[in-house]
Amino acid sequence: MVNHALMKLGRLRATPDPHLPALAQLWQPKEGADLACDWYSRLSSWPMLANDTVGDCTCAAIGHVIQQWTAYTDAAPVVMDDQQVLAVYSAVSGYVPGEDATDRGALCADVLRYWMIEGVPTPDGGPDALTGAARIAPGDVDVIRHAIATFGNLYAGIALPMSAQTEEVWTAISDAPGSWGGHCVPLVGYNGVGPVCVTWGALKQMTWDWWATYAEEAYALLSPDWLRATGTDPAGVDWAALQKAMAALSA
């Protein structure tokens, strides 16, 4: 079993950035969410992306999102390496490799803005650019389910309790939010128990009660990585309309 207590955190805790549009203004989910959603089974492994030694979780989450999306839309998944992820982390946070004092973490919103404006390097050269991001209230579980099913994942900021260091499934809700620290993960599916995320190079199950207690930020991501040749994402959302609405709100 991985000793999570030795893993690095790195999300600076903050409320969702109000400058990013609310998903509710862009998209209305259908009635009734599916009981389960799996956007991860096509992948047999997830890289650590240096998050065991550096607090780059906000940027490692980008690598996992790109890998996951492209596993479902490309002939082969696009997998960022440690150096590419660390280059993004350095650009956003000022981290200098080898200088531990500069490993201070990053804000989710800052990382998303960098991804949108600068793009991130990938093995084929990139840059991979995010079209936009929209915030979701973490407590709206029905919308969370719909958004994961529609957009393939959610980029999430969580305030980890100390109990998360030793649990195989994140379940206990007695410890204070953030008593361990801030963390960032992509939610790549869900089931009756709760969301499934990628963290520290592996899948992690959490319960819905745990999510409701410790989730602080959630963002739906819009990206060409999730497009198919039809111009719609796998759940049939009108990509052009969403992109236009987000551009108007973000102006």
Image: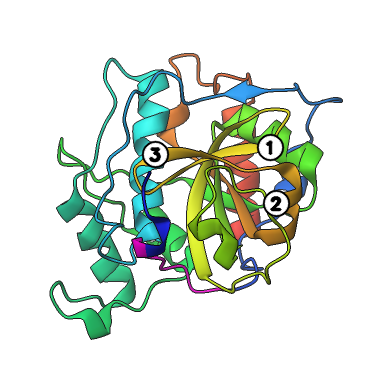
Q: Earlier in the sequence, mark 1 or mark 3?
A: 1
Q: Are marks 2 and 3 in contact (CB under 8 Å)?
A: no
Q: Quadrant of the C terminus?
A: bottom right
Q: Which residues are magenta?
A: 6-13
Q: Is residue 49 visible?
A: yes
Lateral position of residue 88 relative to residue 114, left or right: left
- Residue that label 2 marks: 210
- Residue at position x 67%, y 60% from top? 214
Instruction: Name the residue nearer the viewer: 14 or 99.
Output: 99
Instruction: Name the residue nearer the viewer: 7 or 90.
Output: 7
Q: x, y percentage for residue 106? A: 41, 71
When the figure is inspected, residue 24 is found, relative to residue 190, above or below; the finding is: below
- Residue that label 3 marks: 202
Q: Quadrant of the N terminus?
A: top left
* Amino acid type for the residue under numbered disc 2: Trp
Q: Quadrant of residue 220?
A: top right
Q: x, y percentage for residue 7? A: 35, 60
- Residue that label 1 marks: 194
Q: Are marks 2 and 1 in contact (CB under 8 Å)?
A: yes
